[in-house]
Each structure stands twice: as C-alpha cells, then as structure tokens.
C-alpha cells in the first residue's frame, strides 16, 4: 500500500522534529508573540532557522495535514538549511537530508 503525500509528509515532519532534538536544536521555550509576528521569509529578523522550522513550519504543516487542506506545492528550504546548519558540519547531514526530502516530496522535483 502506497502512502499518500500527506502521510509521507507527516513521517518526514516527525523525523525532522526528532533530528532537531538529536542535534540539540529543539527548544522548550516558545518565542514570544512579537518574534512570531514577523512577516519576513523564515522570520529571519526574529528567529533562527531551527526556531522557524520548529515553531512555524512544522506546526503549520501539521495543521494543514490535520485539517486535510492542500499541501504546498512549491517549497525550497534546502538552501536555507544548508547555510544555517553548515556550522554543525557532518552533524547536520541527516537534518539536511530530511529537509531535502521534504522539498522533493512537496515540490515534485529531485533536489
């Protein structure tokens, strides 16, 4: 039985959450409402990329799936991930791989 795109996305979101925890980038404290209110891409003026992944991307995608809404069809997170996580070196390989898989799955292209 083939998994739906939503099911595949959910699996990757779980893996992304787990990997953020593994590389100790997962945060227990939610950013304040002002930090969350940014309108810039990735909230780069108020959040780190890992905060954006955790508190904006993962939460939004889970809500979309839960409400059975259409998934985004054009995303490109990989370049931002590669830049943001290069300080981690090889520790970030799995994290970057998961993000690349999300890009591929949702955009329908090989990354």
Image (tube, rainbow, N blue to C red):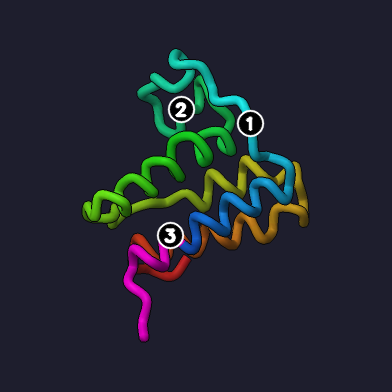
Crowding around mark 2 (Cα neighbors within 10 Å: few <14, some 14 to 19, many 20+) is some
> Label for residue 110?
none
Does the residue at mark 1 contact the one at mark 3 (Cβ under 8 Å)? no
Q: Which residue is mark 2?
A: 43
Label 1 residue SS: loop
Q: Nearer the viewer, residue 15 or 47?
A: 15
Q: How far is disc 3 from disc 2 in space, using C-alphas? A: 23 Å
Instruction: State the residue in front, 103 or 33.
Output: 33
Q: CA distance from mark 1 to mark 3?
A: 21 Å
Instruction: Decide which of 29, 41 is in the foreground and name it.
Output: 29
The image shows residue 95 at horizontal and vertical percentages of 63, 55
- Residue 9 is covered by the magenta coloring: yes
Q: Position of residue 73 (x, y in %)?
A: 28, 57
Q: Which residues are magenta?
A: 1-10
Q: Is residue 67 above or below residue 107?
A: above
The answer to whether the residue labelled 2 contacts the one labelled 1, judged by CB atoms less than 8 Å apart, is: no
Disc on the earlier residue, 3 or 2: 3
Q: Characterize the local packing of mark 3: few (<14), some (14-19) or many (20 or more) Cα atoms within 10 angstroms.
A: some
Tag 3–tag 2 contact (CB < 8 Å) = no
Whichever of callouts 2 and 1 sits on the residue coming sooner in the sequence is 1
The residue singled out by tag 3 in the image is: 10
């Amino acid at each position: 039985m083939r998994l739906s795109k939503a099911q595949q996305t959910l699996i990757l979101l779980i893996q992304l959450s787990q990997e953020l925890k593994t590389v100790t980038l997962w945060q227990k404290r939610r950013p304040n409402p002002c930090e969350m209110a940014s309108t810039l891409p990735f909230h780069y003026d108020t959040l780190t990329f890992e905060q954006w992944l955790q508190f904006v991307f993962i939460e939004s995608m889970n809500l979309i799936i839960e409400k059975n809404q259409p998934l985004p069809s054009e995303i490109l997170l990989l370049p931002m991930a590669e830049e943001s996580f290069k300080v981690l070196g090889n520790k970030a390989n799995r994290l970057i791989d998961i993000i690349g898989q999300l890009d591929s799955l949702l955009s329908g292209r090989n990354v």
